[in-house]
Image (cartoon, rainbow, N blue to C red):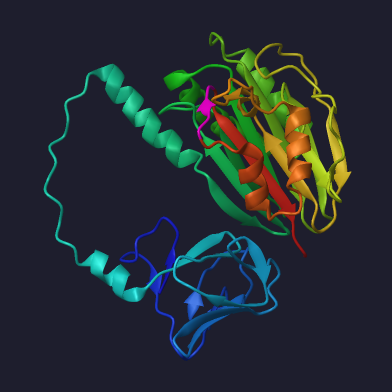
Amino acid sequence: MLTLADISGETWSEDILASEKILGRAESAQIRLDHTSISRHHCRFWMENDTCYVSDCGSTNGTYVNGLRISKEKLKPGDTIVVGRFELVLAEKDRVLATLDLPDPPTVPNLVLDPRTEERHLATMIHQRLTPSQRISLPGMLVDVTYQPSGKLGGDCFENCELNGRWIMSLFDPMSHGVKAAMYSMLLRAELQRWISLTAEPARCLQWINSELATMGINDLYVSATVATWFPRTQTLVYAAAGEHPPLIFHDGVVRNLGETAGGMPLGVSAGEHYTEHLVQLKTGDRVFLFTDGVGDVVGSDKSTGLTAPVLAARLEQFGEDSLADQIRKTLDLAGKTVIDDVLLVGCEVTPS
């Protein structure tokens, strides 16, 4: 049985049978996902000798199993299949149905919280849903987001959206903590949505958001940020940074732009700040890494510090032969370490068009 990630089998599921089922955008598709990231006939699923298979149908954006692009692949329960903007999970049907038939849990009385605790609880739930660790499939690009807040409530956030065939990716890091940082990240998402409807130019977008923040009159509303625009047809990335190290460009096993200037002060410091745009032509297999400064604040049991940009680049090169997800996991190596600030690392891999 196929289910959508983060959606229960009771809400959305598809049985895989011996007779093949086509997944696609066409009305004739047996598994229909009506979205521009899905081809009319994207891929097909079927059972053969008690084994489930998936095969790509020559789709534009490809079919991925556990992060790897495939043409045909044998599946097992727990495998993740990414098609366009959708993430599917293969599960054993009997096990899914068993969970649907569980009795209702006993009613838990609502806790009476003081206003400050209730505010923190609500902000925590909202922020955890806004920036989860996840895998995203964009046209011509696979994106892995690894996020670990320093406590129950974090402020770092990552956002992506489409504008006229281009994809805008943004990363924000408020220079505050707790409820205030979470509120700031929500405000920044709203500002981003507002301005990218008018322009896809990263530097101008940062400049406009900076002007807005600087004139709001909110104390310590300072934010480091990166905004990048991805053009899938030409495999071109245009980016600008405010107080962050620009994205690291990983090509042929080497980070090519270490030490590149950030191009401007953090947002909210000076209303007249200007930001520099960089354009890079990418190729299939190239990787781009966006990160916040919390990556440098991870502390090991031996009191060693985290990953500055040069150290991060060296570790990315060390694990460059691994898959994107494994490269990120091994590079961060968070097991047993203390996270002082939010850790947000976003890896992007250019996939065949």
Q: Tell me the magenta residue range.
A: 336-340
* In the image, farthest residue toward the front: 302
Which image quadrant is residue 173 in? top right
Q: In which quarter of the image is residue 63?
A: bottom right
Give the vertical position of 51 relative to 267 (above or below). below
270 lies above or below 323: above
Q: How many labels does the image show?
A: 0
In this view, the residue in front, 132 or 277, is: 132
Image quadrant where one finds the C terminus: bottom right
Helix, strand or loop: magenta stretch: loop
What is the x, y in percent for residue 52? 49, 81
Q: In this view, does 43 lie to the left or right of 281?
A: left
- Residue 5 is covered by the magenta coloring: no
Q: For residue 241, say whether it is visible.
A: yes
Is residue 292 or residue 187 the one in the foreground?
292
Answer left or right for 128 relative to 249: left
Q: Which residue is located at x 58 percent, y 59 percent?
A: 85
Give percent across and percent down for residue 171. 64, 34
Residue at x-position 71% and y-position 11%: 270
In this rendering, is residue 101 above or below 122? below
